[in-house]
Image: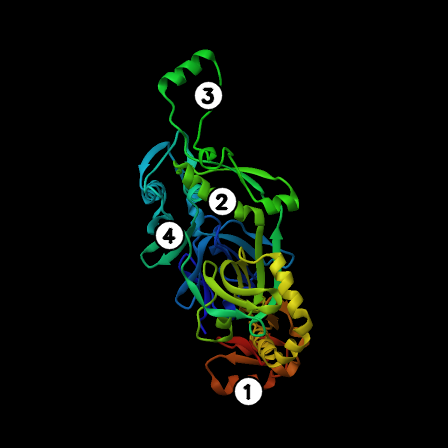
Amino acid sequence: MSLFRVYVDGELFYHPNLSRLAITQAQVKEDAENIDSLTLSAPFNHPYLSSIQPMASVIECRKGDVTVFEGRALDDGTDFYNTHTWTCESALAYLKDTVQKPYSYKGPLRGLLEYFISEHNKSVEEKKQFTIGTVTVTDPNDYISYSNSEYSVTMDAIWEKLIKTHGGYLQLWYTKEGKVLDYLSDFTAASLQRVEYGKNLLDVTIHQDHTERVTALIPLGSKIEREESSDEEQADTGETVVEKRVTIESVNGGWNYVYDEQVVEEIGWIWATEVWEDVTVPGNLLQKAKVRIAELAKGITSMELNIVDESDTGADIGSIRARQYVECYSPPHGIDGRYLCVNKTTDYLDPSGNTITIGASGVTLTSISVTQDKNLGLLEEDLAGQNSQISGVTDKVEEISNARMYRTELLVEGVSIFRNREQQSILHCRVYSWDQDITDTLESSQFLWHKNSGNEASDAEWDSRHAGMKSVFITTEDVQDNASFYCEVTI
């Protein structure tokens, strides 16, 4: 199984096999439609706490050879136990650090993204720069015309002029040569894992947001150029100049809107408008509007699945990641298809709590209810037949839980360096499971202290006298010229 590590400015900050570099939380949240984030926590005695400088340090998380997160810390907070916690944002957030000066652009869609990124790269240091990779979002005419007379944040400019009008997703890749930014109409990656009821699916929560539902939509296309004379006439009369846009009346029976009749009967008329800046033909605008109203009338449906990621159990298979399509199958919940993983929450210290959120535009509550009605009568029998598979899932979860990270801390009561005679100290060994102190739950016989002074015979004799103790006294006589001490705990 690939090891998870954390680096700060290229230096190792966490390694699962080094108790000295222990952390208490490393949770990455991937979001296909937004900026990924990381929550990182470390105990008060971590030797490199001060190395993380918010907004400056580069924090990188790797699983094996793959970078699963790279970005910067936004803040640094502490709790009652002086545990430090940083909230971090991915490198995509660097696009919020620069502004686009007033511009006028005419040309292919890819060219506008290249222009934005070029202007961004001129204004930042190398670690914040991007190169453009794959662009699959297209314009029907392969020609767009945009301008802005004001300064705008680069991320806002990309959102307003590209994503909002043409759709698509930004995807960031971390390579040895630097950060590569894709602009995709849809994701093409597919997970090798399959989420399946009775195998690796632990829980299902279905969400449907009705607050965003729309039943009637007025679509507007590109601006219609007016003759100069008409502009002058309106200016002379002092009347307000109203910009005209392409509409659908001419191809829609004189109506300037589309609606979903069935949903109107269900919840009434709820109106909205939407602008397609690049659409110049009424027929094309009508086609886009029909597709859009079908989406808006349903509302937003998503399903949150609590899963066992098989890559965390030692299986030689890639992790399920956001921005991948995943095969999901659960008959009692009406889930059967290939869905986009919109969000993924991965706790790299406690993988039993990993969740994914899948987009479910093809699944409605009605169809789910029908499927559930069919299955409820057979569910008890089905569960009985699934006992062996569910037992396998339970075993995997227990295996993950039992494979939790243990770490020890040595607390010194007294001096750490002996300079005078008759000095003494007490060494306490504390044992933690994740961030919970479990020392008091362990037997004293599980603790074995070791002395390392270079004198094997003397050290062995000292070790034998200090077995089965959670705390030991150290005196000047124990140290002699030079010595170090550590505790071995058997769990």
Location of residue 87 in the rendering, given as x and y in whole percent from the top left corner: 53, 53
Which amino acid lies under the numbered mark 4 shown in the image of this protein?
A: Asp
Instruction: Tell me the CA gap for discs 3 and 1.
Output: 96 Å
Residue 195 seen in render: yes
Q: Nearer the viewer, residue 284 or 301?
A: 284
Instruction: Tell me the CA gap for discs 3 and 2.
Output: 30 Å
Q: In this rendering, which labeled residue sits more in front, label 4 or label 2?
A: 2
**Which disc number belongs to residue 182?**
4
Q: In this rendering, which labeled residue sits more in front, label 3 or label 2?
A: 2
The secondary structure type at the circle numbered 4 is strand
Specify few, some or many for label 1: CA neighbours under 10 Å numbering under 14, 14-19, or 20 or more: few
Q: In this rendering, which labeled residue sits more in front, label 3 or label 4?
A: 3
* Residue corresponding to mark 3: 241
Instruction: Tell me the CA gap for discs 4 and 2.
Output: 28 Å
* Residue corresponding to mark 1: 461
Q: In the picture shown, does residue 394 fall above or below 71? A: below
In the rendered image, which quarter contains the N terminus? bottom left
* Residue corresponding to mark 2: 290
Q: Nearer the viewer, residue 250 or 66?
A: 250
Q: Residue at x 34, y 55 (%)?
A: 178
The secondary structure type at the circle numbered 2 is helix
Instruction: Tell me the CA gap for discs 3 and 4.
Output: 40 Å
Please report contact status of discs 3 and 1: CB closer than 8 Å, yes or no: no
